[in-house]
Image: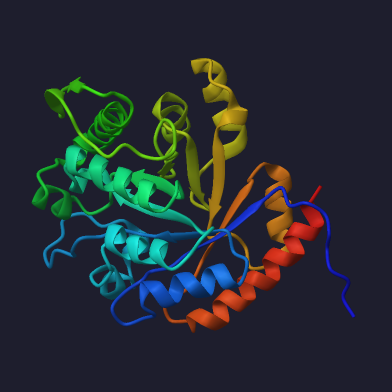
Amino acid sequence: MTQPCLAPSTVQIGVCVLATDRGLSPTTLARAVEARGIDMLFLPENSHIPLERNRDWPPVDGLLDPLSRLYDPFVALSAAAAVTERLLLGFAVCLLTHRDPINTAKAVASLDLLSSGRVILGVAGGALDVAMRNHGTAFKSRWKVVRERVLAMRTIWQQEEAAYAGEFVEFGPMWCYPKPLQAVGPPIWIGSNSKWVPGRVADYADGWIVYRGRYEGDAIADLRAACEQRERAFEDLSVALMDAPWDATEASDAVARGYRKLIFLLPPADDTLTALDRVASIAADVRCRVGG
């Protein structure tokens, strides 16, 4: 008989699910994730798939159907919050190029307050240039837009009379409530894999969602270097590995390299509950190996 592991865990385990109207409901999914002792549930965002597309991100191939059917993550995570108690509720990712920053700041703050401070806000610009233009954002400006909208939302969360003036976001002094439960707002993690991301994370974010195998470099070392350049403490940031390996030894090795958050990407064609059972088994093994 396998002996239970009693060592305290130093890693958080999460899952990212392409939650659509053809799969489990958000409430059923959230209950199942929490019941298995998994720490975090991440949902992606995609408003629509344009039929005519000028530029596609290669990994989109084969995912056009689920990406066109995703639940709105704010609605789905609100439903998840209502039926769970400890499960962290993550966006992987919220596409800020598709969203008004004032409304988004209010939605994030509302979800954080109503969930007792359980929100992790993963953000990015997106990959489909036509979809961005449908929302009023030029592809070439996407990361400038993301940065300004992050800074503007933080201003709204942290100031009683918020004002912001930038190239893409501008508003005069205003009142906007509720404020998030988390003191300075939910942690903001950037979900992207280009060579510029370490600098962006060190500049204005709280963490990085690194997609396994897509960042050309040593993400941990590069983020440390970016933090030194910007005089930020690397230890204050979170580094999460998206698409964590489905092998306990490999997953534990990732933790040893500095990834303190592991996010397992559930294949859309797999049976979700069976996949969650596999994640729970791997998580138990990893926690025993790295705990304490």
Residue plotted at (40% across, 47% down): 122
Quarter holding the N terminus is bottom right
267 is higher (above) or lower (below) than 194: below
Q: Residue at x 24, y 37 (%)?
A: 177
Q: Is residue 210 above or below residue 225?
A: below
Image-quadrant location for residue 89: bottom left
Q: Quadrant of residue 170?
A: top left
Looking at the image, how many numbered discs can be counted on the residues?
Answer: 0
* Res. 131 visible in picture: yes
Percent from the top left, x then y, of residue 145? 22, 34
184 lies left or right of 105? right
Residue 65: % across, % down: 27, 75
Which residue corresponds to the image point at 15% horizontal and 60% vertical from the top-left? 53
Q: How is the image coloured?
A: rainbow
Residue 183 horizontal/vertical position (percent): 44, 32
Q: Residue at x 18, y 43 (%)?
A: 103
Query: Is residue 144 placed above or below 178 in the rendered structure?
Result: above
Instruction: Inspect this view and state whether residue 218 appears.
Output: no
The foreground one among 164 and 127 is 164
Foreground residue, 267 or 121? 121
190 displayed left or right of 2: left
**Where residue 79 sits: x, y (%)?**
34, 66
